[in-house]
Image (cartoon, grey):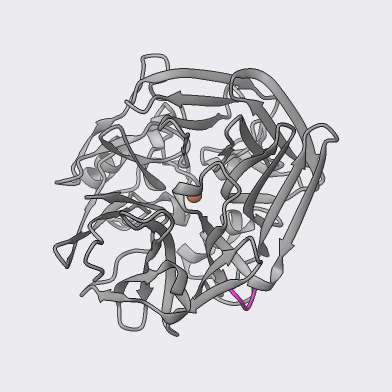
Amino acid sequence: MPPNLEGHLFRNGPAWHNVGPDRFSHWFDAPDMVQRFSFENGRLAHFGKLVKTSRNAAEAQAGHIQFAGFGTSGPHLGTGGSADGQNTANISLLNHAGELLALWEGGSPHIINRETLDTEGRKSWSDESGGLPFGAHPREDEDGSIWNIGYSANPAALIIYHISSEGALYNTHVIPQSATPMVHDFMITRSKIVIVMPPYVASSGDGDSIVELFEWKGQNPTQLLVIDKNDLSQVTTLEMDPFWVFHFGNAYDISPTEIGFDFALHDDPGFMTKDAFAVMDGSWDGAASVKSRYVEARIDLIRKTTCLQESPEFGQVEFIQTDARENLSAHRYALMLAQPGGASEFGFNRRVLVDRTTGNASSFDADEAEILEEHLIVPKPGHLDGFWIIGTSLDWRQGITNLSVYEGLHLNDGPVFKAALDLALPLGLHGTFVRA
Ligand SMILES: [Fe+2]
């Protein structure tokens, strides 16, 4: 293990897919487990614990699924009566102002004790904002403050949060919507907030699960909202050909009237609306029903033009990551998981690091039976630009989870450290590295 690699990789994701005799219908619905991989004194230790949201605790006690969720529904399932009634806290983690928070996107964050991984209740920054939807991908500004968004279907609105570096709520700002789009991730530049709104919108249809409430309207454009950070009422709206997006890399100001960013573009939300159901009932054939690719965008806010440069040569991609030290600037490196065989092949089996200044990419392939999970760029202490790439994978043949560390600029050479756990962890979503 690199001698100066000290800290904790925390990961989150749906974990407990069966409650008693019941099975969740959708991959995103299971109660979560927070995993902690600790790099200490040259040793790696793992610890994990299920998160106790009110629904998770109630269902564990009852021994049955009791609430509808992202995709699971049924006449015998309740809605919990509030945004937090279905909250599984199972998407991502935010380490901010001394607290580790497990994030969902339809309700409140949950406070996780970093030592014991016990759940210490819901996080609320103010009486007004308590219980409101709080997105899974907050963005850190250069002063250490945090911006985030939430989307509410009823009433239809986007919510913008700004939280100080000390964890105090500066502001919440509501942008009413006629039809709420599902917005999983967003971006900030030094001067702006950038929200991409695909035409996957809450309709008036009946249904207790979130997927039942939303509808893909592929005849409509994907909208781009660019909001002035210093005056949240100043909004520029642009339209693009329709696409779906889960995750962005990083955004930056090119000039006062131009912005750039990168992301994984999907033709539509089919992974979420089809594959993530099929994976739970065993009917999935392993192919993605929708193509994705790495895209670099350049937006002119005066001419209202959008230029999307696609890089299909990397294949199917997701989980774009950038170096936090390059946040808000034209970043050089973008790390992603890729499936070079495209949508028809199973899972992600290649780590790809793109040098955006040259277009060159380095990569390292997984073993044949490995399914990759999100990998992170972890800055090296004492370096201006050196970094490691750290990530986990599930070896389904051996039934174990692996953790690998790479020298960031020598990804091609393979891991400098690889540890095999003696158990298989459920495939998760997002993580964060917290320096010791
Ligand atoms: Fe995400």
In the foreground, 5 or 86: 5
Q: Along the line of sight, which residue is nearer the eye, 5 or 317?
A: 5
User: Does 190 sit above or below residue 32?
Assistant: above
Q: Quadrant of residue 22?
A: bottom left
- What x and y, as percent, mark residue 280? 46, 63
Q: Residue at x 62, y 41 (%)?
A: 252
Residue 315 visible in image: no
Q: What residue do we see at 79% from left, 50% from top?
A: 307
Number of marks in picture:
0
Position of residue 250 measured from the top left corner of the image (x, y, whole percent) = 57, 47
Residue 275 percent across, percent down from the top left: 56, 62
Q: State which quarter of the image contains the N terminus.
A: bottom left
Is-magenta flag for residue 342?
Answer: yes
Left/right of residue 84 with respect to residue 222 in the rendered view: left
Residue 282 is covered by the magenta coloring: no
Above or below, 393 relative to 199: below
Give the overall secondary structure of the magenta segment: loop
Q: Nearer the viewer, residue 426 or 414?
A: 414
Residue depicted at 29% across the width and 49% down the height: 434
Write down the region rendered in magenta.
339-343
Q: Nearer the viewer, residue 25 or 348?
A: 348
Image position of 260 (left or right of 370): right
What is the x, y in percent for residue 320? 53, 57
Q: Is residue 60 above or below residue 47?
A: above
Looking at the image, residue 357 lies above or below residue 85: below
Q: Residue at x 31, y 28 (%)?
A: 123
Residue 121 seen = yes
Outermost residue, top side: 127
